[in-house]
């Protein structure tokens, strides 16, 4: 390997100080590091008779190697003595191959052309010393040039000097023979450097055994990885977020009680201010390593964690049971009808029964499409951050064009959703207080059959469905909105309150600090993340199954996209609404033409595509929760 | 909508104009040198740095020397010439190449990412006059400012080019451009502690080791003039 030759100890004119009379030696055996017979060394010492070579070298770790193991290339001792034959540059890499390979990327080699002997100066006298404090020796060596007072004042430096072998010496962070070329002072490799050093910190600070014996928490890394900083870093985009060294500084790493520490309360404003600008002093109460389960230290976070957990588990458990029971009933019922040759009336509809009745106007269909698109964009940009360590998350983020672009799309989609929700809120107010009627009869409209607000009939319907699931009666007769549809609608409202509210706070946390203290950002992040998980799993495993995958709709119900369904289906699914339309004489006005082929094709493609994407994401999310 | 998203994400930056010389990588240069023993390859660092370590078989010619006197290059303007320097940014090799192109040389090449790329490829180096590395402490700009105020035994030695020195230097600093330091160092008094100043702090270590070898006591300014100017800007 040619590069190994680059590791010269003595080169050029300096070689001659070392030798002036050696015998002819077997160069080949020397290259192979075979011990050279003692007379050869004796012959060298005939001229090279300084105590270093006569005494110290014999006790050194290289004593067994003989002079010509390293100083190869002398074929004629006479010529060498006359200065006509010079030994080749010393190639330490011929024995220390691994180190030589690592050294090719060493900053000192690349930038300053350091060779082995520039650090290992007393190479002829190096001894093996089992009791040597290697870390201290490394610090002493590095600080010959890098007289870093910051480091010697830091927790690490002090601990090493006290004999703690766990504490980091220079080489533990910067590498030993592979010191990296990061011109951090020039900000040339900010991403690589941040990633490199953060990983170095994590390596020790996530080591349970090491942290426990040093009275430190081994969870700090995990807590950091749970925050926005940690997740973006884990996702593979360390450049725009704080790594360990950004807050704890590079060398002056001290506990926060120490006034010299960057994380001492008095220094936090400057510390956070290196990246964040325009914040209120309240911003500083943000916790960079929050522990949701620590009731004493973070009571508000703890309560939020419990509440969100209960909400998630409770809602999903309740609706999963509901869906499974429902699915079972419908499937069994289907099987019975199949065996008995019964065909549902909507399938054999004739005449008026075939006519299409409008359920969703164009406006609401477009709104649903926008909801689907913005929801998927939010999930596809948000969840990769939630499960940042997974392959699928990193692949999806790359598709977006990186974490920054992904964040822009997330905010763009959030904006569409917020505008949509504002519009629906306005529509709801208009529904309750229509022009001309004012407040009159609003309660009736709120609890009436066209309202999406739950009423007493929903409770009865729910009981009726449960009885039906267990074969204890007929299914209830529904009006325009079933209770699960109302839940879907209101869940989006609650979701927007929770996710949207927290999302707006997190949008620009510096500005939010003028409204709320920094620790509220921790709560907002938790709520945002957990509510998002609830929303996604609810849509993908409950809404999809209730509305599309239920056996009588499988694989999808295109109604929300085409807007119309058969009159016979209306009668079957929503008999009370049909009766109302008949009594009020509105049925005729609800009749529409059959949806066109392009509309049906687009609906099927978009609908099925969304369903499949949702299923894929469900698998990815559940996989990450269970095995991530 | 997805298509729009993808299109937005793919927006690129406008392309920069290509340089008037040819960039070659380390393996290409090695192959060229192997096939043409007469190939002219110039190391554009100072003589001190170049003799300390260079690509084997190449010549030392600092870019300032080329800029001052382009006749130092061979008379035949059709000859293939390659320039390289120490930094991955190739700033100095490009200055040399720029001067050559301006003087009418037609086949000018620059080693892409310079000597670091050569070393990282695992190719050998050669040392003609190797400087023993010293233990040279660096001082930060703020500390230096304080030292200047408190101590009288310091001599600030600005190693940058004459032009950079003229454009601005630390008060009291004397100019000994690194590219001809090997010829001029003897004029520096031996009874002072030298503080070496360069552009960004990368070149003072070897220069310091050289001067230490010559009997001087040396310190270096961490981060060079850039760090000094940043400190000054912050104070204002």
Image (spheres, coloured by chain):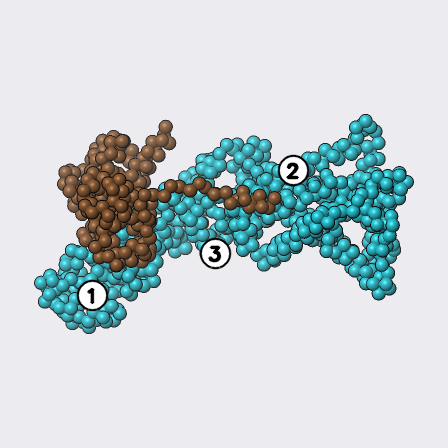
Q: Position of residue B23 (x, y in %)?
A: 33, 49
Residue A245 vs residue A232, the one in the foreground: A232
Q: Position of residue A448 (x, y in %)?
A: 83, 38
A252, A186: nearer the viewer: A186
The image shows residue A493 at horizontal and vertical percentages of 70, 40
Q: Nearer the viewer, mark 1 or mark 2?
A: 2
Q: Which mark is residue A72?
A: 1
Q: For this rendering, which residue is in front, A207 or B207?
A: B207
> Which callout, 2 or 3, points at the residue further toward the start of the chain?
3
Residue A207, label in figure: 3
Residue A542 visible here: no
Residue beneath the point at 20% across and 64% down:
A71
Q: Which residue is located at x 27 percent, y 58 percent?
A: B124
Picture residue at 79% right of the left edge, 30% below the top: A434
Residue at the (61%, 44%) spot, across then down: B1
- The image quarter in which residue A3 lies: bottom left
């Amino acid at each position: 390997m040619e590069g190994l030759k680059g590791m010269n100890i003595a080169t050029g004119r300096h070689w001659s100080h070392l030798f002036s009379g050696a015998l002819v030696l077997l160069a080949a055996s020397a290259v192979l590091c075979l011990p050279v017979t003692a007379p050869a060394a004796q012959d060298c010492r005939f001229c090279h008779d300084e105590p270093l070579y006569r005494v110290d070298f014999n006790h050194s770790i290289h004593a067994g190697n003989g002079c010509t193991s390293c100083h190869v290339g002398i074929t004629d001792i006479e010529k060498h003595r006359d200065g006509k034959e010079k030994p080749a540059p010393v190639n330490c890499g011929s024995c220390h191959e691994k180190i030589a390979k690592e050294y090719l990327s060493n900053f000192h080699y690349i930038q300053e052309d350091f060779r082995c002997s520039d650090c290992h100066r007393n190479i002829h006298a190096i001894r093996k010393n089992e009791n040597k404090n290697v870390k201290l020796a490394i610090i002493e060596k590095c600080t010959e040039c890098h007289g870093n007072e910051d480091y010697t004042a830091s927790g690490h430096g002090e601990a090493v000097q006290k004999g703690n072998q766990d504490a980091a010496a220079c080489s533990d962070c910067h590498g030993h023979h592979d010191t990296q070329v990061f011109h951090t002072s020039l900000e040339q490799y900010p991403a690589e450097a941040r990633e490199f050093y953060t990983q170095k910190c994590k390596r020790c600070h996530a080591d349970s055994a090491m942290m426990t014996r040093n009275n430190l928490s081994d969870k700090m890394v995990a807590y950091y990885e749970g925050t926005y900083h940690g997740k973006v870093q884990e996702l593979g985009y360390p450049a725009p977020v704080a790594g360990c060294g950004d807050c704890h500084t590079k060398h002056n790493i001290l506990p926060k009680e120490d006034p010299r520490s960057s994380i001492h309360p008095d220094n936090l404003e400057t510390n956070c201010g290196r990246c964040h600008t325009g914040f209120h002093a309240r911003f500083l109460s943000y916790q960079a390593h929050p522990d949701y389960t620590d009731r004493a230290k973070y009571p508000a976070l703890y309560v939020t964690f419990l509440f969100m957990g209960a909400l998630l588990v409770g809602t999903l458990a309740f609706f999963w049971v509901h869906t499974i029971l429902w699915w079972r009933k419908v499937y069994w019922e289907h099987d019975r009808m199949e065996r008995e040759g019964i065909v549902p009336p909507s399938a054999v509809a004739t005449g008026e029964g075939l006519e299409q009745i409008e359920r969703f106007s164009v406006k609401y269909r477009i709104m649903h499409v926008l909801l689907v698109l913005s929801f998927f964009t939010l999930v596809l940009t948000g969840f990769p951050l939630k499960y940042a360590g997974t392959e699928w998350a990193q692949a999806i983020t790359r598709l977006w064009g990186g974490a920054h672009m992904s964040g822009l799309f997330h905010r763009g989609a959030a904006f569409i959703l917020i505008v949509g929700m504002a519009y629906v809120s306005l529509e709801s107010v208009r529904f309750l207080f229509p022009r001309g009627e004012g407040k009159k009869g609003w309660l009736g409209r709120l609890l009436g059959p066209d309202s999406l607000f739950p009423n007493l009939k929903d409770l009865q319907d729910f009981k009726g469905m449960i009885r039906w699931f267990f074969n204890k009666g007929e299914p209830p007769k529904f009006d325009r909105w079933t209770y699960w549809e109302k839940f879907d609608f209101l869940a989006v409202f609650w979701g927007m309150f929770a996710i949207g509210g927290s999302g707006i706070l997190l949008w620009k946390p510096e500005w939010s600090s003028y409204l709320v203290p920094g620790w509220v950002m921790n709560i907002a992040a938790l709520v945002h993340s957990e509510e998002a998980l609830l929303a996604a799993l609810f849509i993908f495993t409950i809404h999809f199954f209730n509305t599309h995958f239920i056996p009588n709709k499988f694989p999808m119900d295109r109604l929300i996209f085409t807007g119309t369904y058969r009159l016979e289906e209306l009668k079957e699914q929503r008999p009370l609404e049909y009766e109302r339309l008949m009594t009020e004489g509105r049925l005729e006005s609800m009749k529409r033409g059959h949806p066109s082929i392009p509309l049906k094709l687009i609906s099927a493609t978009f609908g099925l595509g969304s369903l499949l994407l949702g299923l894929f994401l469900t698998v990815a999310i559940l996989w990450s929760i269970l095995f991530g | 909508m997805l298509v729009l998203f993808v299109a937005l994400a793919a927006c690129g930056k406008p392309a920069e104009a290509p340089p008037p010389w040819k960039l070659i990588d380390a393996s290409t240069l090695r192959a060229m040198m192997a096939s043409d023993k007469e190939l002219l390859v110039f190391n554009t660092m100072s003589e001190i740095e170049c003799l300390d370590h260079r690509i084997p078989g190449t010549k030392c010619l600092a870019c300032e020397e080329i800029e001052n006197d382009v006749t130092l290059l061979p008379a035949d303007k059709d000859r293939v010439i390659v320039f390289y320097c120490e930094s991955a940014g190739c700033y100095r090799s490009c200055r040399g190449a720029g001067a050559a192109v301006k003087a009418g040389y037609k086949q000018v090449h620059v080693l892409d990412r310079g000597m670091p790329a050569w070393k990282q490829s695992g190719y050998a180096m050669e040392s003609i006059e190797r400087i023993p590395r010293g233990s040279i402490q660096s001082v930060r700009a703020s500390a230096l400012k304080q030292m200047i105020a408190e101590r009288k035994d310091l001599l600030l030695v600005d190693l940058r080019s004459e032009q950079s020195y003229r454009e601005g230097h630390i008060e009291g600093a004397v100019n000994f451009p690194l590219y001809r330091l090997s010829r001029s160092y003897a004029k520096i008094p031996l009874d002072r502690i030298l503080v070496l100043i360069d552009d960004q702090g990368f070149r003072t270590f070897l220069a310091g080791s050289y001067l230490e070898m010559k009997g001087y006591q040396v310190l270096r300014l961490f981060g060079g003039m850039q760090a000094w100017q940043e400190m000054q800007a912050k104070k204002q």
